[in-house]
Amino acid sequence: MEQSECPVCKGSSLSERKVGRTSMLRCTECGVTITPHKLRRVNEPGFYEHSYVSIPSSRASAQQYRYSRYPEYIRLVAEIGRHCPPPARWLDVGCGSGAFLEECRNAGYSVEGIELSRTETVEAERAGIRVHHDLKGVYGPLDVISMWHVLEHLDEPREMLQSLRSLMRPEGILCIRVPNFAGRWSGLLRDKWVWFQAPIHITHFGPDSLRKLLNDTGFEIEMIRKQRPNDWLVRRAYSLAADVFNTYTNAPRESVKGWVFRLLKDISAEEVFVIARRRA
């Protein structure tokens, strides 16, 4: 049975929308694009354990990845810290191997995460980070909640934000990053865009639809912007980390195909970054 209700605005006016050669759904009320049920993979048993593990296969390459993201992590912690400085409780939803939360902890925050993949959970727990499989084991009040490229994976993003809001203290901070499906590169490349991943991205947001969802679920937006996550510092850190690990650990060198894909992502992978405050 195909979806009949928009997960963002709960409207019932959904129409077919072609994204390149891929048939999607579009809500005519709020403008969000939705992946039809027949294309989705995220609800397959074990999907996030076996098909969507983001850390590389060896600990050496995992460390290389971590060092390449270091400028991004530091920038995020510093910017969010201006809205909610430490000490404070920080929950990262979709925390992966916990590398980002380690930097939050280094900055003085009390941290914990949510992660579906057992493989990545083990990595985070090795670093002394408490990780939950879902929200059932999380208790408030929380001061900061982050969701880096998580919201687009959810069948019910509205319900998730409402649940997170109930765990936050009044005036708590919610931070979200999602691919910008309403951006120039998405419109130009359509189903060839690097972040058009219909089988695993369920709700495809732009700034307007994300703003509406946050307003409707009890949040006041303090900052919203379009950005490329892989700025010059991140790209430079990636190159430096690769040079070090290739020289001293015999790590495999990046293929030409991998280099081209990464360059395309650096150029075209625009995202929406939001910092919002819980309304009392």
Image: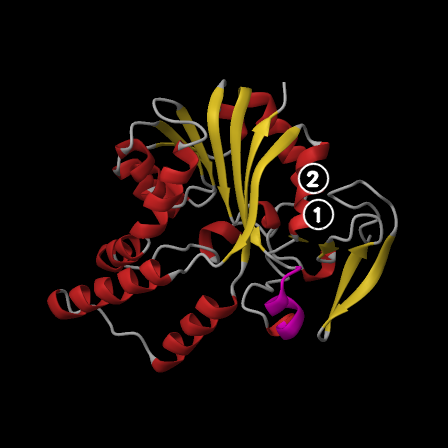
Residue 193 is situated, as x and y percent measured from the top left of the image, at: 58, 70
Residue 229 vertical placement versus 184 (above, below): above
Rate crowding at label 1 as few (under 14), some (14 to 19) or many (20 or more) other CA atoms within 10 Å: some
User: Is 136 or 7 nearer to us in this picture?
Assistant: 7
For the point 24% across and 54% down, the residue is 63
Q: Which quadrant of the view contains residue 96?
A: top left
Check if residue 76 falls in the magenta segment: no
- Spot the residue most to the left: 248
Magenta span: chief secondary structure: helix
Name the disc covering residue 222, or none.
none
- Spot the residue most to the right: 13
Residue 263 is situated, as x and y percent measured from the top left of the image, at: 42, 73
Q: As shown in the figure, which amino acid type bears the numbered disc 1?
A: Ser
Left or right of 138 on screen, residue 211: right
For the point 71% across and 47% down, the residue is 209
Q: Assign a secondary structure to mark 1.
A: helix
Q: As shown in the figure, which amino acid type bears the numbered disc 2?
A: Leu
Residue 226 is situated, as x and y percent measured from the top left of the image, at: 55, 54
Q: Which residue is mark 2?
A: 213
Residue 85 is situated, as x and y percent measured from the top left of the image, at: 38, 27
Left or right of 41 on screen, residue 208: right
Q: Which residue is mark 1?
A: 209
* Residue 156 visible in this rendered orientation of the protein: no
Mark 2 and mark 1 in contact (Cβ < 8 Å)?
A: yes
The residue segment tinted magenta is 182-189
For the point 69% across and 62% down, the residue is 39
